[in-house]
Amino acid sequence: MTAPDATSPAATPASAPSWRESLAVYLQPRVLIVLFLGFSSGLPLALSGSTLLVWMAEAGVDLGTIGLFALVGTPYTLKFLWAPLVDALHVPLFTRALGRRRGWLVFSQLLLIGAILLLALTDPARSPLFVALGALLVATMSSTQDIVVDAFRVESLPESEQAAGMAAYVAAYRIGMLISTAGALFIVTGFEAIVPRGAAWMWGYVVMAALVLIGTMTALAATEPPQSLRAEAATQADDAVTRVLHAAFGAFSEFLQRKEAWAALAFVVLFKFTDAFSGNMTVPFVIDIGFTRNDYAIIVKGVGVIATLAGGFVGGYVARRYPLAVSLWIGGIVQAMSNLSFSWLALVGVNEWALTLAITSDNFCNAIGTVIFVAYLSALCQNPLHTATQYALLTALAAVGRTYLSSGAGYLAKATGWPMFFAISVLVAIPSLMLLAWLQKRGHFEALGPVRV
């Protein structure tokens, strides 16, 4: 394997950061802004995913149909198609008042709130089709918000704060997901004491819509990234069509001209596949073996949050301490092996301590893998003229595993049983690790660097 050059951005720093230095950087204002935006990005994903699956399972929807609902995540794989619009176009009133990135942030968040409220009005028992359409709309607005947040994060953080920003973003992202899963389930249970179950789910989603305002207030309190201001100044003489075409074709052509571009894209698709393959069926699995939604919610809400925070911090430290390729090896292996904890839980059965250990392992290991993966994606985006488009392309490809490759997970679980299913989910990580070894040997990681103007 090819070791990173000592002078390359991917190499280990000459002086490794201490734990005290690693902690201090998390208190930087820019990092804190990214943290709250990460929460806003993570919140809506589960509302069209795992939380919605619980709602559908309680409504009596068939397990196979529930598995197919992974397809409503299609906007996360196609968001690169409209990302050039986010890079190039101005939102009337919003852009003039707030700037290029912040204007799009507030605009997309307001649309997201409306989409969640529409989904709250649907009924899985009577009209699964309308539920699918509502979930699709939430996913579309959520992925648009992600386009802007990713560009804002990459452009606003200096190189010295990138690792901490990624760790804070991923930890807050997963906390947002936990709030919209465990938190939403608690809220629904509370509402069931005073209203029928269907209305309880509706009000639970209304509360989730209100929480999106945390991201809106953060966007209003933030300042426009200097990278974005310079990119805007460089293109202000161009018309809208020219800016869109430059963002679209410039992002793709620049990336494809890089060394080993196609192998890198395949690696992006496959790296998080092991996590997505098992993750889509975790909630149905826990309910199917005999736990209640409150059992799951209590554990995820408690130790799950702590494990996610710890995993995010460890992932950020690893990303700062080791070369990028080595970090990816660490993240790829630990996130795959954590799936075995659910195989063990399936054999143990209904045991709260076993469930606690499985959830802790899953959240901790996946947070490590995700932080390191986000570090890699950020290193691939090097031009603020089309940061949103390039990052959207990469995250859209990463979502292919979650949306399409894992859509048959429910049928495989029915055919093999839960212990074997989670064991197989470990093996699906092998192709990504083979690609990682090949890219490392070809010197791919030595060419990566920070964002440049």
Image (cartoon, rainbow, N blue to C red):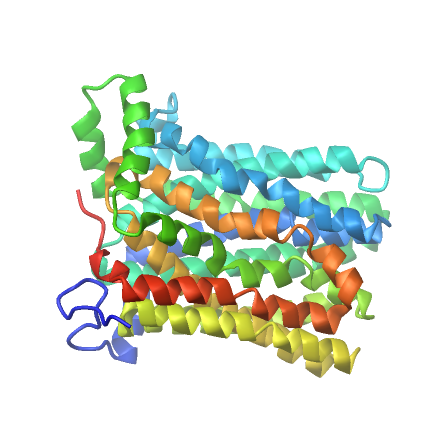
Number of on-image labels = 0
Q: Nearer the viewer, residue 336 or 96?
A: 336
Q: Where residue 437 appears, x then y in whole percent?
A: 36, 67
- The residue at 26%/39% (across/down) is 254
Tell me if residue 382 comes above or below residue 441 in the rendering. Answer: above
Which residue is found at the position 60% from the left and 38% from the top?
138
Relative horizontal placement of residue 5, taking residue 320 as reference (left or right): left
Residue 250, given in percent of the width and then of the height, sits at 27, 33
Residue 322: give x, y in percent of width and height: 28, 73
Residue 220 in view in this figure = yes
Looking at the rendered image, the quarter that the C terminus falls into is top left
Give me the residue at 82% from left, 35% from top: 127
Q: From where the camera sits, is residue 149 visible?
A: no
Q: Is residue 363 left or right of residue 220?
A: right
Q: Residue at x 71, y 37 (%)?
A: 132
Q: Residue furthest left?
A: 7
Q: Is residue 412 above or below residue 18?
A: above
Q: Position of residue 368 (x, y in %)?
A: 44, 69
Q: Quadrant of the N terminus?
A: bottom left
